[in-house]
């Protein structure tokens, strides 16, 4: 077959694969979009963590029965894809996205709904077992909403009403219907409250003058929505336990839709910026990286739609971060290919060698990120678990789509022969390549050589200053009893109200309304149409209803709320510490296993630096520390390890290739490794930071903490992989040098791997 035919065949295969990818994306786009399960932060809804206690002290609790009872109530609400999970021995987390009437749903889920019929002396005459299953319904009497009850045991109901009616002579012929009667409740006390204009705990108290052998009607000062909710509660049956809210997060549909639109737009711009950067920097391989990114995004969304995973705002953040991380794998490969071209290899030989040398680095970097994701998933909850899910899928897709598909497409292009003697298609000028036939040696290395070891002290001094300043400021604020850190309600407990309007609102507008209602909050503007109101007090459901009703009347949109009790706040702090420590230990063990303990300690030192710098910046700026920051810190750990491993892998490669090394040789090895990997570090940081910058500038304010922490952490991670990890390794290696070991002498490279003008070029 002729060379021309081979080129055509190779390019035809490349275009065919790209066409198949395009057809697959186009054919499944609508299906994937319609089957994506959006979280409550993207379409509105609520998440509530309940603590269950038995109705009778000392009784056993069957949590599966509790879940079944809650599921029945959710079915009545008609909510798609509810998330009901048991946590520990006595807690249940309920997540309902897209609920139209959130407060009615909240009332229905949390109410025990133990219906009882009692007399004026609070003696129980009957319970809900007397009512037909599903026998409660909304009805109207004289135009007013009531609840109609169909009796299963009409004879028993007739006997009860006959007995009540016989007490007409002393005026105690009243049948009182209670919902969740508790010891200590009294009809007499509640009657006095009712006469004083307050809402009584009982739901109905009707005089009975004769026996009633048919159906029953519950009357009261109901609205239509309240009557319908009560009927649904009765039909769903009583819960076998009492549920107490210990944490809640309610997001209005309008706020969720705005957050989705802003974040998706920012993410798309970020992805396009990454593709543009790759094409500008790497030419044809950059185009292949763009095709790979399209396939990567399609695969991510397809997997989420297929497994029914919940897509959240932090999940979008993890996806955008994943774009940068998966492109990072391309950069490692492409830079290795360039370095082989700079040595004088042919395009084909450089591509083969570059792909071989980069694989172990990519695998180790992705595996350590996977460790962080798995730890977050196992021990995290809520937003952390959603973020971890996306991170785990990202790692697998990076290895499958990037390493497999990207290399397959690149090899089709290379093997077609069209790129032979065209290094400029890889962003390498021919003037940068030595002529091996004339005995020239490599003279271009990508960047000017730099003494990183000598300059590390300046960066490290800056890091010490930042950490010291953060510590001193934290102590200062602690002494003033303002808190060492600005802990959000996730850790300090409290309530956060998100006031949303379809018109511009200011902090003073919201503050004036809250003051009028008698509440004291701290306020923060979150854009033109949103204001956060925060207090360290965990408000009751009644208080939340009062606040929400006022703002609905004022702006026409229901505010969101997030309530965390002190017990949950303490547990989140403990879990955050455990998550970080476990992640560190897991990574330390893996790097020790794959490399040596000096590399592991060096990488761990870089991680500690990154965490301290990120937390230090938050302390200096008094930014809110919340649970999303923990997700970021764990991600930074994976990202920093990624960069540090690239450098450490190059150091190990140089050490293993040398038979005899003296202490002064190690300094040169570190500098050479950093000079050889600097472009990788810089370009990897750019492609990862670009999406984060656009999220920071254009994304939803709901994930500002997340994106800002990511921005700070990535810069810290880049610097630590250059100035911390290699320097710690250098110190340990020169002070605790391991036993000498012999290494096989590398065979002399065959000449036909190089480009020799006049022979194979």
Image: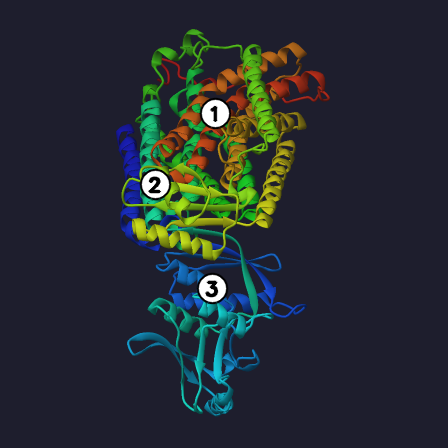
Picture disc at residue 715: 1
Q: Is the C terminus in the top left, top right, bottom left or bottom right quadrant?
A: top left
Q: Position of residue 338 (x, y in %)?
A: 41, 21
- Asked if marks 1 and 3 touch (Cβ < 8 Å), the reply is no
- 10 Å neighbourhood of mark 2: few (<14), some, or many (≥20)? few
Q: Is the N terminus in the top left, top right, bottom left or bottom right quadrant?
A: top left
**Is residue 223 visible to us here?**
yes
Task: Determine the secondary structure under disc 3.
Answer: helix
**Is residue 416 visible to us here?**
no
Mark 1 vs mark 3: in front: 3
Please name the residue shown 71% across and 17% down the image: 735
- 10 Å neighbourhood of mark 1: few (<14), some, or many (≥20)? some
Mark 1 vs mark 2: in front: 2
- Asked if marks 1 and 2 touch (Cβ < 8 Å), the reply is no
Picture disc at residue 509: 2
Vertical order, 89 against 281 (above or below):
below
Please name the residue shown 36% across and 13% down the image: 757
Front residue of this view, candidates 513 and 463:
513
């Amino acid at each position: 077959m002729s060379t021309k035919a081979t080129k055509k065949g190779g390019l035809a295969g490349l275009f065919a694969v790209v066409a198949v990818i395009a057809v697959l994306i186009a054919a499944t786009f609508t299906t994937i979009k319609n089957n994506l399960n959006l979280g409550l932060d993207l379409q509105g809804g609520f998440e509530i963590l309940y603590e269950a206690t038995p109705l009778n002290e000392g009784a056993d609790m069957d949590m599966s029965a509790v879940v079944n009872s809650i599921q029945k109530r959710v079915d009545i609400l008609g909510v798609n894809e509810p998330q009901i999970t048991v946590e520990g021995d006595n807690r249940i987390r309920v997540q309902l996205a897209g609920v139209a009437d959130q407060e009615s749903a909240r009332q229905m889920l949390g109410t025990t709904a133990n219906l009882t019929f009692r007399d004026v002396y609070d003696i129980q005459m009957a319970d809900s077992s007397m009512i037909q299953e599903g026998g409660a319904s909304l009805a109207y009497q004289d135009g007013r909403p009531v609840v109609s009850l169909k009796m299963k045991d009409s004879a028993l109901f007739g006997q009860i009403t006959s007995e009540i009616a016989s007490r007409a002579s002393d005026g105690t012929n009243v049948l009182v219907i209670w919902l969740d009667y508790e010891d200590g409740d009294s009809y007499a006390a509640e009657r006095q409250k009712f006469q004083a204009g307050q809402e009584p705990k009982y739901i109905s108290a009707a005089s009975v003058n004769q026996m009633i052998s048919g159906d029953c009607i519950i009357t009261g000062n109901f609205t239509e929505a309240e009557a319908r909710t009560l009927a649904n509660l009765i039909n769903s049956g009583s819960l076998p336990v009492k549920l107490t809210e210990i944490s809640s997060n309610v997001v209005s549909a309008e706020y969720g839709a705005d957050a989705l639109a802003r974040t998706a737009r920012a993410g798309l711009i970020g992805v396009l910026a990454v593709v543009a950067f790759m094409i500008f920097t790497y030419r044809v391989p950059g185009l292949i990286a763009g095709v790979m990114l399209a396939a990567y995004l399609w695969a991510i969304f397809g997997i989420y739609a297929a497994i029914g995973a919940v897509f959240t705002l932090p999940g979008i953040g993890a996806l955008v971060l994943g774009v940068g991380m998966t492109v990072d794998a391309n950069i490692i490969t492409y830079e290795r290919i360039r370095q082989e071209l700079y040595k004088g290899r042919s395009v084909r030989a450089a591509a083969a060698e570059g792909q071989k040398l980069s694989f172990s680095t990519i695998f180790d970097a992705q595996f350590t990120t996977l460790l962080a994701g798995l730890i977050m998933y196992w021990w995290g909850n809520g937003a952390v678990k959603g973020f971890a899910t996306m991170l785990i899928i990202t790692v697998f897709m990076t290895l499958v789509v990037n390493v497999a598909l990207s290399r397959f497409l690149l090899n089709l292009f290379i093997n077609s022969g069209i790129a032979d003697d065209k290094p400029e298609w890889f962003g390498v000028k021919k003037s940068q390549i030595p002529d091996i036939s004339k005995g020239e040696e490599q003279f271009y290395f990508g960047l000017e050589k730099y003494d990183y070891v000598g300059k590390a002290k300046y960066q490290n001094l800056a890091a010490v200053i930042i950490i010291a300043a953060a510590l001193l400021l934290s102590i200062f604020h602690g002494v003033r009893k303002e808190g060492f850190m600005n802990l959000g309600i996730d850790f300090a407990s409290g309530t956060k109200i998100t006031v949303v309007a379809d018109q511009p609102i200011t902090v003073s507008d919201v503050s004036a309304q809250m003051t009028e209602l008698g509440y004291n909050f701290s306020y923060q503007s979150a854009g033109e149409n949103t204001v956060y109101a925060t207090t360290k007090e965990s408000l009751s459901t009644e208080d939340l209803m009062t606040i929400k009703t006022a703002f609905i009347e004022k702006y026409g949109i229901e505010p969101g709320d997030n309530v965390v009790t002190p017990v949950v706040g303490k547990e989140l702090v403990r879990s955050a510490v455990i998550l970080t420590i476990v992640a560190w230990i897991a990574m330390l063990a893996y790097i020790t296993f794959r490399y040596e303990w000096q590399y592991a300690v060096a990488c761990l030192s870089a991680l500690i630096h990154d965490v301290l710098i990120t937390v230090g910046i938050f302390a200096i700026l008094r930014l809110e520390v919340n649970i999303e920051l923990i997700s970021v810190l764990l991600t930074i750990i994976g990202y920093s390890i990624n960069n540090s491993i690239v450098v450490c892998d190059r150091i190990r490669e140089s050490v293993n290739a040398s038979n005899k090394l003296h202490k002064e040789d190690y300094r040169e090895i570190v500098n050479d490794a950093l000079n050889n990997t600097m472009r990788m570090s810089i370009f990897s940081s750019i492609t990862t930071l670009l999406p984060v910058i656009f999220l920071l500038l254009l994304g939803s304010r709901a994930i500002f903490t997340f994106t800002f922490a990511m921005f700070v952490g990535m810069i810290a991670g880049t610097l630590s992989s250059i100035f911390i990890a290699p320097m710690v390794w250098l110190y340990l290696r020169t002070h605790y040098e391991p036993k000498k070991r012999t290494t096989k002498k590398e065979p002399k490279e065959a000449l036909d791997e190089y480009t020799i003008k006049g022979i194979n070029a």
